[in-house]
Amino acid sequence: MKPAIGYLRVSTSEQGKSGLGLEAQMAAIRQFSEAEGFELVEVLTEIGSGKLGLDGRPVLKDALAKAKKLKAPVLVAKLDRLSREVAFVSGLMAAKVPFYVANLGMDVDPMMLHIYSAVAEKERKMIGERTKSALAAKRASDPTWKPGKATTPDGIRRQQEGFERGPTACIATAGAFAVKMSNIVQQFNGSGMSSRAIAGQLNALNVPTQRGGKWHGTTVDRILGRLQA
């Protein structure tokens, strides 16, 4: 059995206390370890934002140090548990401490890791842009309105869909979404991946569709079709 260090991360203290997300991450790492012949020497858990640099992530820093001493890899359930920033992931790759992502497998190409992290970074920015646009539209329609605790990302998404009702608005919104997704979809498509395979990769990365659902081959085909129109 080959030694390995497991690393889990959740974003808030509430998630840390409730175990929300930790159990699923642990299950994914254990399954991956068993399948690939790793022995989990230690599993470290961090509560903090993925936006922070390595100096702001002491548990991850400790995990990397322990892995380097053991000449072992760090195992994570998903790439975004490390970071949603391309530069951060690239820095880890350059640090000479190997890491494996359970839902991507052992043989993922380094170039693909850069692409996956670029998708995660882009999606984080898109979420921020959509939230700002929805809040701005709400304020424009009701100057007295102020966001409260009930203003969740899902609620904002539904508000945004309400603002955009109507055939013309739907077509314009779909076109804008296709443009936002164009880089990653075209890169996957250019590498010879089928629409179904591209959909699988986007689902594995937790990238939502325009309506917040799962990707299918037909969804990818529609994106490609809009880009060629």
Image: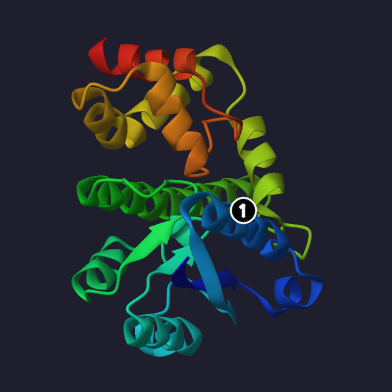
The residue located at (50%, 48%) in the rendering is 133
For residue 60, what is the image quadrant? Answer: bottom left
For residue 167, what is the image quadrant? Answer: top right
Q: Position of residue 108 (x, y in %)?
A: 31, 46
76 or 37, nearer to the observer: 37
User: Looking at the picture, which amino acid does disc 1 mark?
Assistant: Arg
With respect to residue 217, does 43 lie above or below? below
Q: Position of residue 154 (x, y in %)?
A: 69, 46
Q: Position of residue 175 (x, y in %)?
A: 38, 23
- Quadrant of the frame with the C terminus: top left
The residue located at (24%, 27%) in the rendering is 186
**Mark 1 secondary-structure assignment:** helix
Q: Which residue is mark 1?
A: 139
Q: Is residue 38 left or right of residue 8?
A: left
Q: Position of residue 223 (x, y in %)?
A: 37, 20
For residue 29, what is the image quadrant? Answer: bottom right
State the colouring used for the structure image: rainbow
- Mark 1, residues whose alpha carbon is within 10 Å: few (<14), some, or many (≥20)? some
**Would residue 7 be visible to someone looking at this image?**
no
